[in-house]
Image: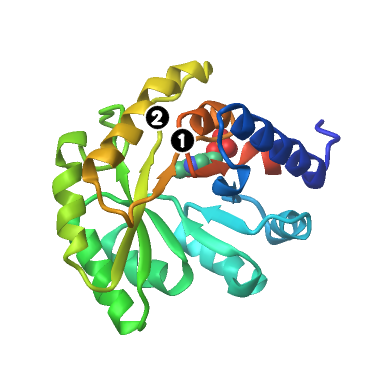
Amino acid sequence: MNMLTIKDNLSKINEEIRKTAIASNRDPKNIMLIGVSKKKDVNTIQKGIDAGLTHLGENYIQEAIQKIKIIGKEHACWHFIGHLQSNKAKLAVQYFDYIHTIDRFKLALEIDKQAKINNKIQKILVQVNIGKEESKSGVDIEDTIELAKRINSLNNVSLKGLMCMPPFSLDPEHSRSYFKFLFELKKSINNIKINHLSMGMSHDFKVAIEEQATMIRIGTSIFGRRN
Ligand SMILES: *Cc1c(COP(=O)(O)O)cnc(C)c1O
């Protein structure tokens, strides 16, 4: 049994973010903490918000919408971080401030269309399949620059950054080379709007911060284990 509260977990993580950022010569303010609340109920999420969490990440559209309808869009900034099917683009645009998982032009095009209908500029990130894993979504590394270019031609989406999930390993050091690679890939796109790197989860967020992450996505260490 974990006796620590969500508030305790958050203070601990915020302190670790601060320390790691400073040790890496970075301003902790440039690191956005996204609390990943998939499979957690509304009460649990509300505790996170009450403890100061301002960004929340969800993976499943239907589950997320049910929760966002209750919690409200105004109490947190909502990030979609799960795999997105084109036929769910409409809902993602209606409910989410950021979509991290754009990995094909067809999806970007649909998001652009829906954003136009909703009279908004949708903030998106391109997910890169950094570990070349068959089982994971994400655009192939060698197709990333071309996808970013095509996305830049769209009027109602704004490409804010790149996102990745390295192959899982218990050793956080294993993620470092993948994070470094995403940083270099972002540099090679050289577009000033693309300033975010969404990388790092509960087990490897410190390494991600050392490697220039600006958005870290943490679930377990804030909300506890998922069933
Ligand atoms: C679940 C999830 C996370 C959070 O993982 P934890 O290990 O619980 O911190 C981060 N990013 C994505 C894309 C996820 O699906």
Measuring 40% from the left and 58% from the top, which residue is drawn there? 99
Q: Is residue 135 left or right of residue 13?
A: left
Image location of residue 145, percent across then percent down: 18, 45
Determine which residue is flagged by label 2.
Answer: 179
Image location of residue 116, percent across then percent down: 29, 80
Is the residue under label 2 in contact with that under label 1 (CB below 8 Å)? yes
Q: Is residue 66 left or right of residue 12?
A: left
In the rendered view, tell whether residue 65 sits above or below residue 23.
Answer: below
What is the three-letter code of the residue carrying label 2?
A: Phe
Q: How many other residues sit within 10 Å of disc 1, few (<14), some (14-19) or many (≥20)?
A: many
The image quarter containing residue 134 is: top left
The image quarter containing residue 87 is: bottom left
For discs 1 and 2, the disc positioned in front in the rendered view: 1
Determine which residue is flagged by label 1.
Answer: 212
In the rendered view, tell whether residue 159 sits above or below residue 195.
Answer: below
Decide if residue 191 is in sight here: yes
What is the three-letter code of the residue carrying label 1?
A: Gln
